[in-house]
Amino acid sequence: MESRGHNKSSQKTFEVMRNFAETYAKRSDTYFCSDPSITTAVIEGLALHKEQLGAPLCPCRFYEDKEAEAKAGYWNCPCVPMRERKECHCLLFLTPENPFAGSNQTLEEVNLEY
């Protein structure tokens, strides 16, 4: 797997996480943020954590010990608040009534070289 630098995941892992996010959005009847750059950034963070920690730890929270949190699983995407109450802190999975929700459950091809 080629390295994309310290804060970038590989394109392959990004695509795996994008496919997961699209599938989960459809399954949970949620939508991506109306601003696709937010969706892209969150998926990139999930992909990076998947590579670094072996789990898609929520990238929008601060952790004293990321490895311990990834092993605990509570904040691994989809996190417990999302699974139980459809509350996504990252704005990745939004219910239709959320003011930031867009109308998409898919993310068009993304060039990660931004």
Image (cartoon, rainbow, N blue to C red):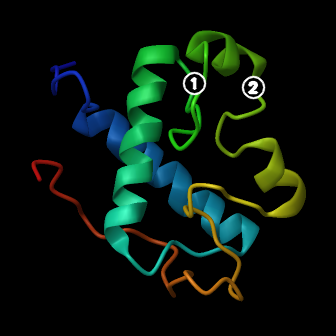
Residue 47 numbered tag: none
Please say if the residues under marks 2 and 1 sit with CB atoms less than 8 Å apart.
Answer: yes
Q: Secondary structure at mark 2?
A: loop
The residue drawn where x is 42% and y is 49% is 43
Q: Residue at x 29, y 31 (%)?
A: 9
Q: Nearer the viewer, residue 14 or 113?
A: 113
Amino acid bearing label 2: Gly
Q: Classify 102 as above or below 37.
A: below
Q: Provide the secondary structure element on which disc 1 rests.
A: loop
Direction from residue 83 to residue 17 in the image, left or right: left
Where is residue 81 drawn, in percent x and y?
A: 82, 50
In the visual, does 96 lie left or right of 74?
A: left
Q: Which mark is residue 55?
A: 1
Rendered image quadrant of residue 109 = bottom left
Residue 72 position in % (x across, y down):
77, 18
Q: How many marks?
A: 2
Report crowding for label 2: few under 14, some 14 to 19, many 20 or more residues within 10 A (C-alpha): some
Determine crowd level at label 1: few under 14, some 14-19, many 20+ residues with C-alpha closer than 10 A: many
Task: Give above or below for 43 relative to 103.
Answer: above
The amino acid beneath tag 1 is Ala
Give the spatial CA distance, label 2 vs label 1: 8 Å
Q: Residue at x 77, y 54 (%)?
A: 82
How far from the left and from the top, in percent, is residue 46?
47, 38
In primary-sequence order, the first of circles 2 and 1 is 1
Task: Tell me if residue 34 comes above or below residue 48 in the rendering.
Answer: below
Please provide percent x and percent y for residue 1.
Answer: 22, 18
Question: Residue tagged by mark 2?
Answer: 73
- The image quadrant of residue 85 is bottom right
Q: Residue at x 16, y 27 (%)?
A: 4
Q: Quadrant of residue 96?
A: bottom right
Q: Residue furthest right?
A: 84
